[in-house]
Amino acid sequence: MADPKRVDLRVKQKRAILVGVVLPGAQRDLEEPLDELRGLAKTAGVKEVGSLVQNRQWPDATTYLGKGKVAELKQLIELQKADTHTVTKLTKPQTHPTTTHKPDNIESQSPYD
């Protein structure tokens, strides 16, 4: 059996679009609402290639984002050749942000593969 070559061991770094949904009552004194998500992505070895933030009264039941932001996300994914996206919901100060990786309903509308 031949020894593996260096190029055979290379791992492709994931390219992600970071998405924030800011709900009423969320703590907005942060300069950048995606700071925590950005840090988590960096720790996971994911390269941020774009970001979107949407202020909403409540998350859309099917896509979490509004139709316009879903369309914008799809364009950004194509333009940046992203292979994943990560969404965080920023809520009231007494709760922690929740993070969801590639929500199914958005993924079904995204141009992956």
Image: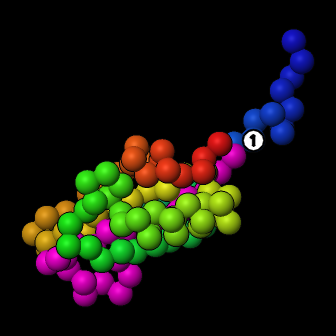
The residue stretch that appears in magenta = 12-35
Colouring of the image: rainbow
Q: Determine the residue positioned at 89% across, 18% down.
A: 2
Local crowd size for mark 1, using a 10 Å CA cut-off: few (<14), some (14–19), many (≥20): few
Which quarter of the picture shows residue 32? bottom left
Q: In the rendered view, tell whether residue 2 sits above or below residue 106.
A: above
Residue 7 position, x and y percent, is 84, 39
Is residue 33 shown in magenta?
yes
Residue 95 in the figure: left or right of residue 99: left
Q: Determine the residue positioned at 62% across, 57% down.
A: 82
Q: Nearer the viewer, residue 107 or 35?
A: 107
Q: Which residue is mark 1?
A: 10
Tell me the SS state at disc 1: loop
Tell me which amino acid carries mark 1.
Arg
Q: Determine the residue positioned at 81% across, 33% down.
A: 8
Q: Determine the residue positioned at 43% across, 52% down.
A: 106
